[in-house]
Image: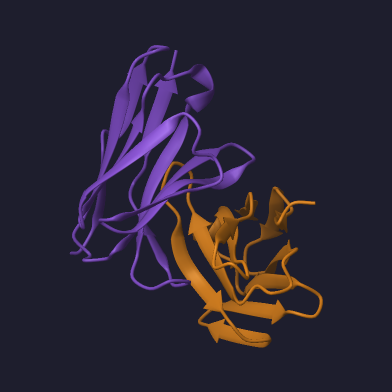
Amino acid sequence: DADVTQTPRNRITKTGKRIMLECSQTKGHDRMYWYRQDPGLGLRLIYYSFDVKDINKGEISDGYSVSRQAQAKFSLSLESAIPNQTALYFCATQLALEGEQFFGPGTRLTVL
Amino acid sequence: QKEVEQNSGPLSVPEGAIASLNCTYSDRGSQSFFWYRQYSGKSPELIMFIYSNGDKEDGRFTAQLNKASQYVSLLIRDSQPSDSATYLCAVYSSASKIIFGSGTRLSIRP
């Protein structure tokens, strides 16, 4: 089955560490997204990419960076992790603008 | 005012009854509206989308859209315990930017 995968699924790290979350997809979709989810705040968009050469900031990009290595791969980096970046992170793909988004299983990140 | 607002719940509904979930949005130019279901600890999955005013039915689910009043709702008929989840409303703004509500937690009691 065409799928969206995320690694790692869980990660505990310390303040100041650099960490990378990876997303891979076999759906063949050009559009990819990174969200974070916090209790009571829903999903908030961090970065999105419409193709390999197109990277855009979302509403909460400060403290994060991304890399679109290929159509199938979109990585999110925290250059210097801080405790308020503790959250559940989701990657999503999309075939068409304003169409359905397909979410990966999520990465639970804890920054101590 | 939040761009997409939902009552956080929890909304408790007896098994077999109709669950009604509501969502309001602020951008009058929004064109596309989605309902995602998210089980605890899992990723969101799409259950309904609607683009036009009126009702759209799919099995036990009905989405209702009223652009004049800027609200979209989801009705779940014959509620089952497996419907217990958080339901996220998502709206594409006039700038084609997707905005998620914070979700309504639904609990179906046997």
The colour of chain A is purple
Q: Which chain is orange?
A: B
Is residue B18 visible in the rendered structure shown here? no
Give the image location of residue A88, x and y in percent: 45, 36
Residue drawn at x 26%, y 33% as measured from the top left: A8
Which quarter of the picture shows residue A102? bottom left
Which quarter of the picture shows residue B63? bottom right
Quadrant assignment for the C terminus of chain B: bottom right
Tell which of B78 and B61 is nearer to you: B61
Residue drawn at x 31%, y 24% as measured from the top left: A19
Looking at the image, residue A3 sits to the left or right of residue A104; the answer is: left
Residue drawn at x 69%, y 72% as measured from the top left: B72
Task: Farthest residue to the front: give it.
Answer: A53
Is residue B63 visible in the rendered structure shown here? yes
Whether residue A45 is situated above or below residue B94 in the rendered picture: above
Give the image location of residue B25, x and y in percent: 72, 64
Residue drawn at x 48%, y 72% as measured from the top left: A98
Whether residue A109 is situated above or below residue A12 in the rendered picture: below
Tell which of B79 and A8 is nearer to you: A8
Tell which of A6 and A57 is nearer to you: A57
State how many labels appear. 0
Give the image location of residue B40, x and y in percent: 48, 44
Whether residue A86 is situated above or below residue A39 in the rendered picture: above
Give the image location of residue B55, x and y in percent: 65, 86
